[in-house]
Amino acid sequence: MRIGELSRRTGVPVPTIKYYVREGLLPAGRLTSPNQASYDDAHERRLRLIRALLDVGGLKVAAIADVLAAVDDPDQSVHKVLGVATDLIVPTYADEEPDAELDAELAAAREEVRELIARRGWLVDDGYPAAEALAAALAALERVGHGAFSSVLDAYADAAERVARADLAYVAGRAGLDDLVESVVVGTVLGDAVFASLRRLAQADVSARVYEGDEGDEGDEGDEGAESGSGRTTNGET
């Protein structure tokens, strides 16, 4: 296909496609004449991956180049390639001003995360970005007086394991590594949004059952008591 057709099929403007080629993100097309090049399905798949990393993953061009280098490295396992992609899209936290108390809280949170990983038997390397992000979140909870939140970490981990298995079951049917990485990036970023929304819905349901149900029962009992009292007063009975 010509570059115009590639642009129409992917929704990526021609100048942008040429920019990706210049930056080495997209292989050049096969020259069919001095001024014409032909592109194929592999170019379309790669463009889709680039756009997923850029638009969904929020990665910069340099980071996208790192992911694509891993994808194109025949010595990299699928696990390593997916690790490169997901590591780059995990939220990071800006460094704070040095503070002994904050350092102590973060150190304690890191140890708690290490214990969680060991307890769960998770095959995660030290220094994994998600582990550091979890430690930062736990340290923040401690600072705002909710350190006891760590008591539900294993319940969260149970849910996370089920979601992770569902994630990988979804991407398992993808044929090419480009498609696999694209699915993981899109699934991780948008899947986080889906899971957060499902969590809110479940919280609303549980809250209604636990709290509104109690209030309703108390209200019914109060109404019954009022009716009984009113009847006794009207009839003059005790």
Image (cartoon, rainbow, N blue to C red):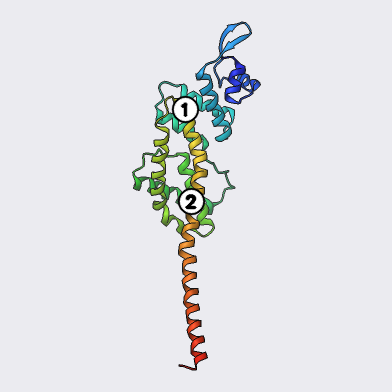
Q: Who's the residue at 50% across and 57% down the image? A: 204
For the residues marked 2 and 1, what is the alpha-carbon distance in whole angstroms? Answer: 28 Å
Which residue bears the numbered disc 2?
199
How far from the left and from the top, in percent, is residue 4? 62, 17
Residue situated in front as seen by the camera: 186 or 68: 186
Are there few (<14), some (14-19), or many (20+) residues within 10 Å of tag 2?
few
Vertical arrangement, residue 27 with respect to residue 222, above or below: above
Disc number for residue 206: none
Are there few (<14), some (14-19), or many (20+) residues within 10 Å of tag 1?
some
Q: Who's the residue at 48% across and 39% down the image? A: 129
Q: Amino acid at mark 1?
A: Asp
How far from the left and from the top, in percent, is residue 101? 53, 54
- Residue at the extreme top: 33
Quarter of the image where the N terminus is located: top right
Residue situated in front as seen by the camera: 234 or 143: 234
Secondary structure at numbered mark 2: helix
Q: Is residue 105 visible?
A: no
How far from the left and from the top, in percent, is residue 112? 42, 50
Q: Who's the residue at 64% across and 20% down the image? A: 14
Vertical arrangement, residue 120 with respect to residue 213, above or below: above
Secondary structure at numbered mark 1: helix
Vertical arrangement, residue 233 with respect to residue 62, above or below: below
Q: Earlier in the sequence, mark 2 or mark 1?
A: 1
Q: Amino acid at mark 2?
A: Arg
Disc number for residue 179: 1
How far from the left and from the top, in percent, is residue 107? 47, 49
Quarter of the image where the C terminus is located: bottom left
